[in-house]
Amino acid sequence: MSAPPEEFYSDERWQNWLDRIREEDIDPENEDSARLLLNLQDDVAIAIAKIVTAADDGAIDDEEALSELEDIREVVLSEVDFGNEEKAMLIDGVQTSLVCVFYAAEEYVANGPADDAPVEEYVIEAGKAEEAEDLDSALGLVAAGGTRIIDGDELDMSVTEELEYGLVTEWVNGLDSLQSAMSDPEVVEEEEDE
C-alpha cells in the first residue's frame, strides 16, 4: 500500500486554473475554451476520485477522507469574483456540476454505494424530482447515482437526452467527469502548450 499524497488538491491549484481563465478569451462555443473548463472540472473530479480510492484502499480512514473532501469543497465552491459576468457564469456552471460529485463522494465514504437501482434510474428519478421542484431530492438522487459510479457502475450519458436542461443535467455532467476520473485518475496538466 502506498502512502497517500500529502495533498490531494490545493487552493493554489484552483487559483492557477482561475488565473488561466482570467487571462484567456473564453468562448464556450470555442473548442479550446470548452476544453479548458472541462479540464478544470475533471481536475477537481480526479482529486475527489483519489480521495475516495485512498479511503477504499485503507490508505486514509473515512474521517480523514471526509475532511479532505470538505477542504477541497470549501476551496472549489467558494464564490469567485471575476469582474467578468460571462466568465463568472461559466465557473458557476463548473461549480454546479461539481456539487453533486462532492455529495456523491461524501455519501460513498460515509455509507457506501446506493444499492436500490442502476445509476440511470437514479438520474431519471432525479429529473422527475426536479420537474416537481424538489431540488433536495433531485440532488440526493443524482448523488446516489454517483455512489454507484464510484462503485464501478457505468453511466450512459444518453440518459440526459430525456431530461430537460437544468440542475440535474449539470449535476450529471459532473458525474461524467467523476466517471472519467474513476476510470483514469491521471492528473490533468494545468499548463499545456505553454
Image (tube, helix red, strand yellow):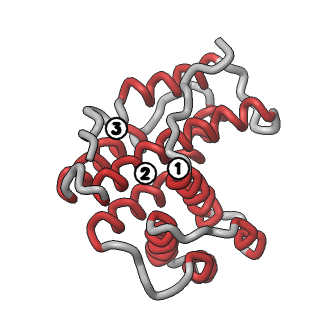
Look at mark 2 in the image and give the residue it sits on: 49
Question: Is 77 above or below relative to 182?
Answer: above
Does 35 sit left or right of 15 as displayed?
right
Rendered location of residue 57, percent (x, y)? 29, 56
* Element on which disc 2 rests: helix
Can residue 73 be seen here? yes
Going from N to C along the chain, the mark reached first, 2 or 1, is 2
Rendered location of residue 159, percent (x, y)? 71, 73
Look at mark 3 in the image and give the residue it sits on: 8
Seen from this angle, which residue lies furthest bottom? 116
Numbered label attached to residue 40:
none
Cα distance between the residues tagged 2 and 1: 6 Å
Label 1 packing within 10 angstroms: few (<14), some (14-19), many (20+): many
Cα distance between the residues tagged 1 and 3: 14 Å
Going from N to C along the chain, the mark reached first, 1 or 3, is 3
Q: Are marks 2 and 1 in contact (CB under 8 Å)?
A: yes
* Quadrant for the C terminus in the image: top right
Rendered location of residue 70, percent (x, y)? 29, 49
* Element on which disc 1 rests: helix
Look at mark 1 in the image and give the residue it sits on: 181
Which of the 4 image quarters holds residue 131?
A: bottom right
Does 24 sit left or right of 161 as displayed?
left
Can residue 135 be seen here? no
Rendered location of residue 158, percent (x, y)? 75, 69
